Image: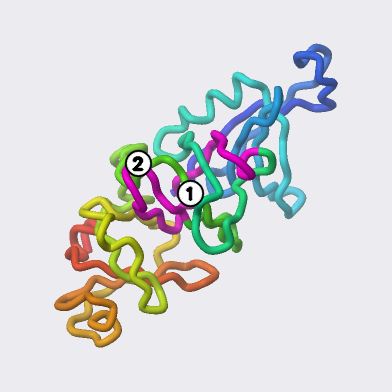
Amino acid sequence: MASAIRFQEVINNNGTALTGNTLRVTAISSDDFKWAYAVGGNRYVEFYDAQVGADRVATVTTGSYAALTSVSGTLTQVTSSVSGVGKYDAPVPGVGTATGTFIINIENIAVAYLTAAGSSNVQYKHRDKCYEFAITSTPTQLSTVATTNNAVKSLSVAFPLTFINGNKVLNSSTNGAAGAIFSFKNLKSAGVISNDQRYIDAGVTGVVSEIYLDTPDSLVLASTTALTTIIPGF
């Protein structure tokens, strides 16, 4: 499921256009990639370093940073803002406090749902912590980033989101048929249920596809789309 991600770390950065710095090529699993971002003249990759057992930030070369988005079906560049939901976690220091561009791992998206034309709220899970923020990409745009093979492994087809934990209806009037995606990496279980009072109270009747996600808040999604459409081969 995971893929390899490589970048050139800048060791002992002296701030003089990399002159005289030591460069080290580092390879990590996409499972350990958190995000990458630019602040000032420097480029950074934040990831879980299995050798030290903790997250760390690596300064990388400009060319290495630009090459990250060529990791097909895994990484994509998005524009973020803090106008999200929940904890309003800033995706990156110096970027998430305003509006900025950074690189995320689509396999870390627990769920992204359409909130308006060209915009999504995202719950993003890296290891055992979730972050919530808004991005200027739609669920459909995010799902088409993935290659065909990776889409099967990491992202479902887009589907209408009508229920999300606690009987709370989110943007049911605007999400349409391309309302949400979620990462298969975070799929705990899925099933089909009919005429459940929880969904009836939330305005959803008939047969409902339930998707349980492995997130810190045990996120539950529901849709009237057939489960065979949401999860290929179900």
Query: Residue 183: x percent and y percent?
Result: 40, 55
Q: Is residue 186 magenta?
A: no
Q: Which residue is under mark 1? A: 134
Snapshot quadrant of residue 176 = bottom left
Badge 2: few (under 14), some or many (20 or more) residues near its Cα, within 10 Å? few
Looking at the image, tell me whether mark 2 or mark 1 is earlier in sequence order. 2
Q: Is residue 98 magenta?
A: yes
Element type at mark 1: strand
Drawn side of residue 18 relative to residue 120, left or right:
right
The C terminus lies in which quarter of the figure?
bottom left
Query: Residue 135: x percent and y percent?
Result: 46, 44
**Residue 7, above or below 30:** above
What range of the chain is rendered magenta? 95-122
Q: Which residue is under mark 2? A: 118
Identified by mark 2, the residue type is Gly
Query: Residue 55: x percent and y percent?
Result: 70, 50
Instruction: Estimate the spatial distance between the alpha carbons at disc 2 and disc 1, rounded to whole Å.
Output: 11 Å
Q: Residue at x 30, y 84 (%)?
A: 198
Query: Residue 126: x percent and y percent?
Result: 57, 55
Q: Residue at x 32, y 70 (%)?
A: 163
Residue contact between numbered discs 2 and 1, judged by CB atoms under 8 Å:
no
Given residues 24 and 220, the one toward you in this image is: 220
Element type at mark 2: loop
